[in-house]
Each structure stands twice: as C-alpha cells, then as structure tokens.
C-alpha cells in the first residue's frame, strides 16, 4: 500500500459528478427508503445493497447514503438529547477528537459534507487506521479553540483513538496549542473513545451514530462551526 501523501482532506475527484445537483433528489429518496427498511428490522448491509442496486448507486454514493441515514426512532431520540451549543457554558465537554477535527479539515479543504437525517453534518473522509495532518489541521484546531473560548465550557477533554497511528503525535499537538492559548483542555489517547465518551458525565461533541444513540447529552458542534464560520463549505442536504 502506498503511503498517504495528501496535503488536503478535500473532495474525491468523482464527487462533482456523483453528487451533482441533478443527483440529489434520487439520493434523498434512497436515504428515505433505507431509513424505512432499517426501521423495520432490516440489516444495514442487505438494506443498503437493496436500495443501492435499485437506484444504481456507485460505491461513494452508497457511503453517503449510509452515513446520512438513521431510523425515525433514532432521529427522535437524538433530537431529544441534543442541546443548544450555547448551553455548554461552565459545563464539562467531551470531544470525539478525530470525528470533530476531520470534519472541519474536510470543510476547510473543500471536501463534501452531508446534512443528515439526524441534523448532523458528516464528511466522507476515511483515515483507514492512520491519521495524517493536512494543511488545514492547524487552522481547524484554532477555529475549534477560538469558538470554545467564546462559549466558555468549564473543561474540555479530547479523546483520540489509540489504534489509529499518529494519534499520540496529534494529542501532543493539541496539548501544546492549548497550553500556548491558555485553554482548559486535556487530551487522552484511549483504545475505545466511544466507551469513554458514553461513560462520561460531560456533554458529548460528536456526530458518530453509535455515540449519539447512547449519549445522554450532546451538541452539534460540527454543524455549528461550519454554518457559522465556514458557510461557503460544500454541503448537500440528504435529509429526505
């Protein structure tokens, strides 16, 4: 396997065609149909194949549909547990580190973002077990930090995935930036961030579906950052 030498977390070369405006209505229908099947007990793999084959979707379009979908029940539960971003004042915040950072990197790099059924914004990036900083990493971290400085949580704890290579290097970079700026941040590199986030009493910052289904409180910081500060980002609405 050749090394990852990308300098940006931008769009895939085929995205302009696969997600052209004339393709979006069909993709939204596919999301709705997949949600219907999942809500009636179908497994994701078989349901996605059924819907993807029906609409002649390419692999990357199927990935987008899968990331955008949730059942009606999941959507209602996630919505009920979602807090306004401003509510984090003087609260403990728990950040799903790679989840947040990579989405903002993708937005800054011109990558495609999905407005999903549960109102989250998700990217189509994949780090395949190894994280590599890109040109936009520093800008993304500073944007996150400046925004949280304004919102004034009591503490901020980042969780990064230990099995992902370079996670320790990124953790040190985040710590150094926080020290320089005087931000009340800590960073932990752990084997299972999802479990640690769910075990915490803090407010979760993530768009990870598994975590959202288990978290008692969460904020949609990905979407807030992009809509507030990066409004020119490439976002397609797949809510259906």
Image (cartoon, rainbow, N blue to C red):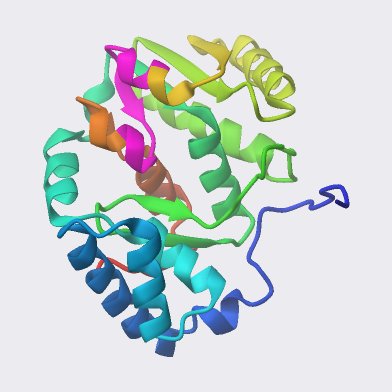
Q: Position of residue 211 (x, y in %)?
A: 33, 32
* Residue 51 occupies quadrant: bottom left
Most foreground residue, 53 or 29? 53
| In the image, farthest residue toward the bottom | 22
In the picture, the quarter occupied by the C terminus is bottom left
Q: Is residue 71 left or right of residue 164?
A: left
Q: In this view, does 222 lie to the left or right of 131?
A: left
Most foreground residue, 210 or 236? 210
Q: Where is residue 184 in the image (x, y as percent from the top left)?
A: 48, 9
Number of numbered tags placed on the structure image: 0
Instruction: Say above or below: 42 vs 184.
Output: below
- Camera sees residue 240: no
Q: Residue at x 60, y 46 (%)?
A: 105
Let me know if residue 200 is in the magenta part. Answer: yes
The stretch in magenta equals 196-211
Q: Where is residue 213 in the image (x, y as percent from the top left)?
A: 25, 36
Let me know if residue 12 is in the magenta part. Answer: no
Q: In this view, does 115 lie to the left or right of 173?
A: left
Instruction: Say above or below: 202 vs 66.
Output: above
* Residue 82 occupies quadrant: top left
Q: In this view, does 61 lie to the left or right of 155?
A: right
Q: Position of residue 95 (x, y in %)?
A: 44, 25
* Residue 13 occupies quadrant: bottom right
- Camera sees residue 190: yes
Instruction: Say above or below: 80 vs 115.
Output: above
Q: Residue at x 43, y 15 (%)?
A: 156
Most foreground residue, 13 or 231? 13
């Amino acid at each position: 396997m050749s090394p990852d030498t990308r300098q940006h977390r931008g769009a895939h070369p085929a995205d302009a065609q696969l997600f052209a405006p004339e393709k979006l209505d069909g993709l939204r229908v596919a999301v709705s149909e997949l949600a219907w099947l999942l809500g009636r007990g179908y497994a994701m793999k078989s349901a996605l194949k059924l819907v993807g084959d029906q609409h002649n979707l390419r692999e990357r379009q199927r990935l987008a549909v899968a990331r955008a979908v949730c059942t009606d029940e999941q959507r209602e539960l996630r919505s009920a547990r979602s807090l306004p971003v401003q509510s984090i004042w003087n609260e403990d915040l728990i950040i799903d580190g790679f989840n947040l950072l990579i989405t903002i990197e993708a937005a800054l790099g011109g990558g495609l973002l999905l407005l999903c059924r549960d109102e989250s914004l998700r990217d189509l990036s994949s780090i395949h077990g190894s994280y590599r900083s890109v040109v936009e990493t520093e800008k993304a971290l500073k944007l996150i930090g400046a925004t949280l400085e304004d919102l004034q949580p009591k503490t901020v704890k980042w969780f990064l995935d230990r099995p992902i290579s370079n996670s320790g290097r990124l953790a040190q970079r985040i710590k150094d930036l926080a020290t320089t700026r005087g931000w009340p941040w800590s960073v932990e590199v752990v084997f299972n961030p999802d479990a640690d986030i769910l075990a915490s009493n803090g407010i979760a910052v993530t768009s990870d579906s598994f975590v959202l289904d288990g978290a008692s409180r969460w904020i949609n910081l990905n979407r807030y950052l992009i809509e507030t500060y990066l409004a020119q980002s490439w976002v397609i609405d797949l809510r259906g």
